[in-house]
Image: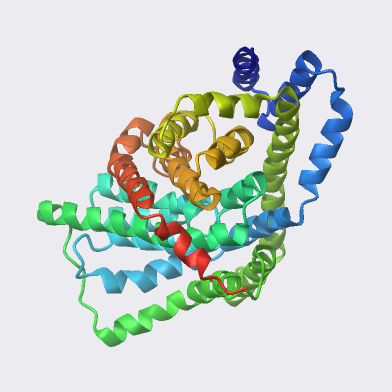
Amino acid sequence: MEIMIAAVMIGLMLALLAGGVWIGLALMAIGILGMLGFTPRAPGDGMAVAIWSHGSSWTLTALPLFLWMGEILFRTKLSEDMFKGLSPWLERLPGRLLHTNIIGCTLFAAVSGSSAATCATIGKIALPELERRGYPESMALGTLAGAGTLGLLIPPSIIMIVYGVAADVSISKLFIGGVLPGILLATLFMGWVVVWSLMNPGKIPAADLKTTFVEKLAASKNLIPVILLIGGVLGSIYSGIATATEAAAIGVIGSLIIAASQRTLNRKSFFGALMGATRLYCMIALILAGSAFLTLAMGYIGLPRHLAEWIGALGLSPAMLLVALAIFYILLGCFLDGISIVVLTMAVLMPTIQSAGIDPLWFGIFVVVVVEMAQVTPPVGFNLFVLQGLTGRDMTVIARYALPYFLLMVVAVVLLYTFPGLVTWLPGHMIG
């Protein structure tokens, strides 16, 4: 009976989403219909309590602050400075400036929190430069599509905040838990660029000029602002000085200082960043509100408990359960964005994850990496859309360029399962 109810609710939700109804409103509508059709309770009071209790969460205040920080930095010269600071150090490494896409995305991800913002910001600077110097388009776009997803994994990450709120997991520990997996993914991407470059030496243009060690050090001064900002945000969390919300406030102040020092902070850019963050947060907040009420409705109907019992009856091992969930998330990612995927599934899946003995902290990083795969999976891979807008190339072509990085993310998931300490070691050594 419960499986039939779930199928009816999923079918109605897909119909609403296909009809163009906003995701948050579609979630609320399904919750109302579920309570009216399958429980004796009136939906009004439950909706008010669920939306207020989730919307007034102090933990959630980190989200608009990090969004604002990313919007401020998006309007600065930070990505341009990172390119100038990194390129002299990479002239002797196989692949040369292709690595600036990966390292630049890694650094910008640590101050942005958004995959799309990371991909767009680094792409605006790096793609014209790589094209001018004759680097192959397949590698330029592929590295940017893959490394742009690091905006989801390397803290501060918007999707980690959403997962932490939805699954009741410490956001600070999620942030710190994403550091080593983020470095692992960046290393795998750079390793592939090195291997490809050694296999195709004639396709990588020669270095324009040789720089001395002193000149490289002089160029590195451009990296100081981003390193200080990363140290301020992540260092304050790891040392126990600040919570995730307080670290977000530190990040906003730091980004305003960077913008002022680069003379990009004015009345127009300040209010543009503020309104950009407000619009984005309102969209996310509506989705979270709808998810909170749908979670309550499903609890009244009993769907999460029965689904957990059904999956438990299948007798899947934790490894097979994770394989099934990875495929499930990748399929969902073909049609929904990462935040929607998390809020739609956490209420149903968390009882199953806990009963299988899987650490919710580790599972959060697993979910983020799998959602990263969906960012480069057509037809709704957000990074593919971003690159299509930047270059005008066909999405299927960009998706083909991004395929090696999708496969490297699969390798990363296997490594995280084999060595769970990659996620749990740093959070276990946090101070405070």
- The residue depicted at 31 percent of the width and 34 percent of the height is 397
Residue 209 in sight: yes
Position of 115 relative to 233 (above/below):
above
The quarter of the displayed image where residue 372 is located: top left
**Where residue 251 sits in the image (x, y, percent)?**
62, 68
Q: Residue furthest bottom?
A: 214
The quarter of the displayed image where residue 431 is located: bottom right
| Camera-nearest residue between 113 and 218 | 113
- The residue depicted at 63 percent of the width and 62 percent of the height is 69
**Where residue 328 sits in the image (x, y, percent)?**
46, 30
| Camera-nearest residue between 229 and 60 | 60
In this rendering, would 210 be left or right of 396? left
**Where residue 355 sits in the image (x, y, percent)?**
55, 39
In this rendering, would 130 be left or right of 81? left
Position of 42 relative to 322 (above/below):
above
In this rendering, would 193 be left or right of 126? left
- The residue depicted at 45 percent of the width and 58 percent of the height is 423
Which scheme is used to colour this image of the protein?
rainbow
| Camera-nearest residue between 353 and 73 | 353
The quarter of the displayed image where residue 236 is located: bottom right
Quarter containing the C terminus? bottom right
| Camera-nearest residue between 292 and 192 | 292
Residue 338 in sight: no
**Where residue 112 sits in the image (x, y, percent)?**
54, 59
- The residue depicted at 55 percent of the width and 74 percent of the height is 235
In this rendering, would 332 be left or right of 39? left
